[in-house]
Image: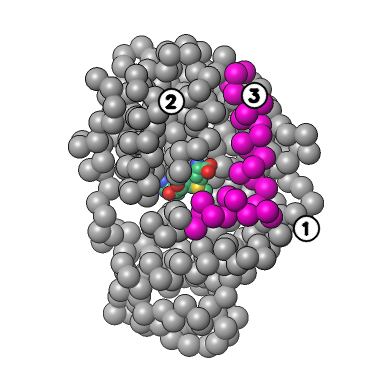
């Protein structure tokens, strides 16, 4: 069978927010430091805004990773080997995977995994059209928890792909736990192609998350619009501004929504109080140096077999294998 197999795999995550998700949103907003999971960024509008961010002049990661993939796709394909099943976590617009699909030798399946359902479906259809012999098995799931994979051709080597430096959105212990699950999925013979954003001049980092066109701000504030639409929130979005900064000691960008006035917001029947200047922490984006990446690989049962970078040493595409 070729083309897109959808009926079973796409039923994984329902479109209506579950009571667990509602409860976790409220828990985050009740906490001393208010937080919302970055997974909630990606409703249809969030996915669209993220694609816009990827094209911004200040947002170097996408362009830089494309350049690395364009240059080293053949070597990555050699690492992956012939006849592999490629599993992409957080497939998004599914652009980067094309560098690999164009080079892989006789891949037997492509399994895009994403929480953003419409984009997942669109990308799956489009890739099925572009790669007619390839089995496309989309999975609509939240990858922060274990999820069921579709049946893959027996004996196919499993290669995971996690680009975009999305690994940086996890705190270190969560990143290790996530990669341990990936390690379990790919098994002893598998591998992982991991996109990693490197530490660099904080001014470049600051600009990338505070673009002059305000698209990252719109992406961040869209979370509140989503909370209003899907989670019974009554936020006045104009009462919040986007704030992003680099914390050097923690080696991470932090994104927040900062209250411009002291006020109260009703959320699913509960009153949430905001002091002037209080923030909701919406995203972390950890930046890596070699020791940090090695520590992560080691703590998750992988080792780094090859690292590919760009000419400015801003980003890595890493090939990891089970340790
Ligand atoms: C930063 S974007 C990267 C997209 C693409 N891989 C790239 O490199 O350009 C993160 C992607 O992961 C998806 N995503 C974020 N959190 C997720 C989660 N918990 N489970 C599944 N997908 C998630 C988003 O919907 C989005 O498509």
Q: Is residue 210 above or below residue 198?
A: below
What's the CA distance linking mark 3 and mark 2? 17 Å
Q: Which mark is residue 203?
A: 1
Does the residue at mark 3 contact the one at mark 1 (Cβ under 8 Å)?
A: no
Residue 56 is covered by the magenta coloring: yes
Residue marked by disc 2: 86
Q: Which mark is residue 24?
A: none
Q: Position of residue 243 (x, y in %)?
A: 62, 69
Query: How crowded is the residue under tag 1: few (<14 C-alpha within 10 Å), some, or many (20+)?
Result: few
Q: Position of residue 103 (x, y in %)?
A: 53, 19
Is residue 99 in sight in this rendering?
A: yes
Is residue 157 in sight in this rendering?
A: no
Quadrant location of residue 146?
A: top left
Dominant secondary-structure state across the stretch colored magenta:
helix
The C terminus sits in image quarter = top right
Q: Residue at x 71, y 32 (%)?
A: 309
Q: Viewed as shown, does residue 68 lie left or right of 40?
A: right
Q: Is residue 52 above or below residue 173?
A: below
Q: Position of residue 187 (x, y in %)?
A: 43, 21
- Disc nearest the viewer among 3 and 1: 3
What's the CA distance linking mark 3 and mark 1? 28 Å
Residue marked by disc 3: 72
The N terminus sits in image quarter = top left
What element does badge 1 sit on?
Answer: helix
Q: Which residues are magenta?
A: 49-76
Query: How crowded is the residue under tag 3: few (<14 C-alpha within 10 Å), some, or many (20+)?
Result: some
- Disc nearest the viewer among 3 and 2: 3
Q: Viewed as shown, does residue 124 lie left or right of 88?
A: left
What element does badge 3 sit on?
Answer: helix
Quadrant location of residue 225?
A: bottom left
């Amino acid at each position: 069978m070729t083309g897109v197999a959808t009926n079973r795999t796409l039923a994984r995550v329902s479109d209506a927010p579950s009571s667990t998700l509602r409860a976790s949103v409220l828990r985050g907003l009740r906490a001393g430091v208010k937080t919302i999971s970055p997974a909630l960024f990606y409703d249809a509008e969030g996915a669209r805004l993220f694609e816009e961010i990827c094209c911004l002049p200040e947002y170097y990661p996408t362009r830089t990773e494309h350049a690395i993939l364009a240059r080293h796709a053949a070597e990555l394909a050699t690492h992956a080997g012939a006849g592999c099943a490629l599993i992409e976590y957080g497939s998004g617009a599914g652009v980067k995977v094309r560098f690999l699909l164009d080079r892989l030798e006789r891949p037997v399946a492509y399994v895009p995994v994403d929480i953003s359902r419409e984009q997942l479906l669109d990308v799956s259809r489009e890739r099925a059209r572009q790669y007619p012999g390839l089995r496309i098995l989309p999975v609509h799931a939240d990858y922060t928890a274990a999820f069921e994979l579709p049946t893959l051709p027996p004996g196919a080597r499993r290669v995971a792909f996690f680009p975009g430096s999305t690994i940086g959105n996890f705190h270190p212990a969560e990143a290790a736990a996530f990669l341990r699950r990936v390690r379990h999925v790919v098994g002893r013979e598998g591998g992982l192609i991991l996109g990693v954003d490197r530490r660099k001049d904080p001014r470049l980092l600051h600009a990338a998350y505070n673009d002059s066109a305000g698209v990252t701000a719109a992406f961040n504030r869209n979370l509140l619009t989503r909370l209003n639409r899907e989670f019974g929130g009554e936020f006045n979005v104009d009462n919040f501004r986007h704030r992003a900064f680099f914390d050097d000691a923690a080696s991470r960008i932090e994104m927040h929504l900062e209250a411009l006035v002291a006020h109260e917001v009703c959320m699913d029947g509960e009153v949430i109080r905001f002091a002037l200047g209080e923030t909701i922490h919406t995203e972390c984006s950890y930046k890596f140096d070699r020791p940090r990446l090695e520590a992560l690989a080691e703590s998750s049962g992988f080792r780094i077999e090859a690292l590919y970078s760009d000419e400015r040493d801003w980003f890595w595409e890493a090939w990891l294998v089970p340790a």
